[in-house]
Image (cartoon, rainbow, N blue to C red):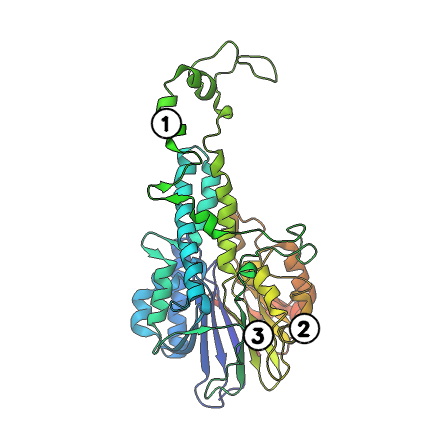
Amino acid sequence: MDNTVRVRMYRQGLGDCFLLTIPTGKARPFYMMIDCGIVLGSSTAAVDRLRAAVADVIKTTGGEVDVLVATHEHWDHVSGFVQAWDVLKDQLKAKNVWLAWTEDPADKQAAKLRAERRKAEEAMRMAVQRLALDGSVRTAERVESLVAFFGATGGSTADALGNARKLGVGKPRYREPGEPPIALPGVEAVRFWVLGPPRDEKLIKKSNPGKGDGYGLDAGPGGSQQFLMSAMAETVDADGLAAPFDEMYSIPLARAEKVGFFGERYFGATVDEGIYDWKDGSAVADQSWRRIDGTWMESAETMALQLDSATNNTSLVLAIEIVATREVLLFPGDAQAGNWLSWQGLKWEGGETGPGLLKRTVFYKVGHHGSHNATLKEKGLEMMTSPELVAMIPVDHEMAVKKRWGKMPLPDLVSRLREKTGGRVLSVDDTVKSAAELGAEWKGFAGEVTVTDLYFELSF
């Protein structure tokens, strides 16, 4: 028997995988697994570490978790349900599987959002191919890195969520924001409050914080990227990605290359004596700078960012309250601005509110690997006023740089987290070898820290 709450963050790489151990007053504690994934393109060694994390969950829990949570449909949160499925399907069961209402196949609003997302995803995959063919290689790479959040050939996020559902003993539960606090039989020590995702689609599609409510990077006036997945979906026709003009008003590229006028002025086939470099007056052979045949595709990157953000905003957000002390452990998935804003208006019978839960937060799983739009300021972190606050960031900065996400985690956010917590912040890629190395930084922390090559664990 143990009175200690433990939060274990696995160190598989850029992705989320957590195991919570909660006392029940009996010999067996309550186990809760939250997400299991790693970003697409991770090394073989990182995938091996993810599989090692799964093996550790099975060993620690005896092959049964009380609740399995998949926060949202992104590869870096659910890939393990594909990459380690050969082990999971035979060795792990979940008494309960919790997903957000946005994943409920019987929910009409959820079905509409999923259909829009699928078609937008299809458009973005086609855009990657078209951009590459048109020579916009770097843009294609950036768009592809965002589309990768939905998986690849041989395993999609939909496949992963389907496998997660199969691990449940019964039917999955689709959680709603503001539903009555969840008290599970035999687990009187804690209760669970569902904060998100919101039902308001405008908030689901609001990715960036408003001016002054972010750390270091603001979206400007209004702070909202207007995101219409239905508009994206309309770029896909029966033959693939639609061009901006009908065929009857277009000259096929292969034909245009052989027409003298276009060859001289757009493809550089010959040097027209009348075409000169505007800088020095010399004749120019390469006329490719005049071409705009791929320009209409440049919006694909913005569309991909918005698709990514809207999916993050479907994250299931849980505030886990320790009943005896009223302290809160906050797990927001990758919730972004609109999801966070929706918590401000949440109220429950008995007087509990979203802001009240934030005020009592003592543990914060930093959202979206510490990105600029996944932790609000005045309506988020600054509301977490507990002097006991600690934070964990599931981020591997080296991998983020390889993915061209150089400010993940955002330095201004990390700096403020350290100020708020008195230095009690752990990232997956931290180099500490033992709890003793944390030294003076962690003075005042009433719990314990366990450091291994496979995970960091906080004990409260």
In the rendered view, would you say 135 is above or below 391? Answer: above
Residue depicted at 37% across the width and 27% down the height? 252
Query: Residue 326 versus residue 305: which sits nearer the camera?
Result: 305
Q: Secondary structure at mark 3?
A: strand
Sequence-first disc among 1 and 2: 1
**How many numbered marks have been drawn onto this rendered protein structure?**
3
Q: Quadrant of residue 319?
A: bottom right
**Identity, as a three-letter code, of the amino acid under mark 3:** Leu
Position above or below: 374 against 350: above
40 lies left or right of 273:
left
**Residue contact between numbered discs 2 and 3, judged by CB atoms under 8 Å:** no
Q: Which residue in the protein does label 3 denote?
A: 329
Circle 2 crowding by C-alpha within 10 Å: few under 14, some 14–19, many from 20: few
Please give the name of the residue rendered at 49% of the width and 29% of the height, measured from the top-left corner: 292
Tell me residue 58's x, y (percent). Answer: 37, 74
Q: CA distance from mark 1 to mark 3?
A: 58 Å
Q: Give the class, few, some or many, for how many residues have Cα within 10 Å of label 3's Cα (few <14, many ≥20).
A: many
Residue type, numbered disc 1: Pro
Residue 97, position as x, y percentages in the image: 40, 74
Measuring 65% from the left and 70% from the top, which residue is drawn there?
A: 442
| Any part of residue 227 in sight | yes
- For disc 1, the marked residue is 252
Viewer-proximal residue among 106 and 377: 106
Indicate the position of residue 158 as horizontal and vertical percent values: 37, 60
- The answer for how far apart the CA atoms under marks 1 and 2 are is 69 Å
Identity of the residue furthest to the front in this view: 248
Residue receiving disc 2: 443
Of helix, strand and loop, which one carries label 1? Answer: loop
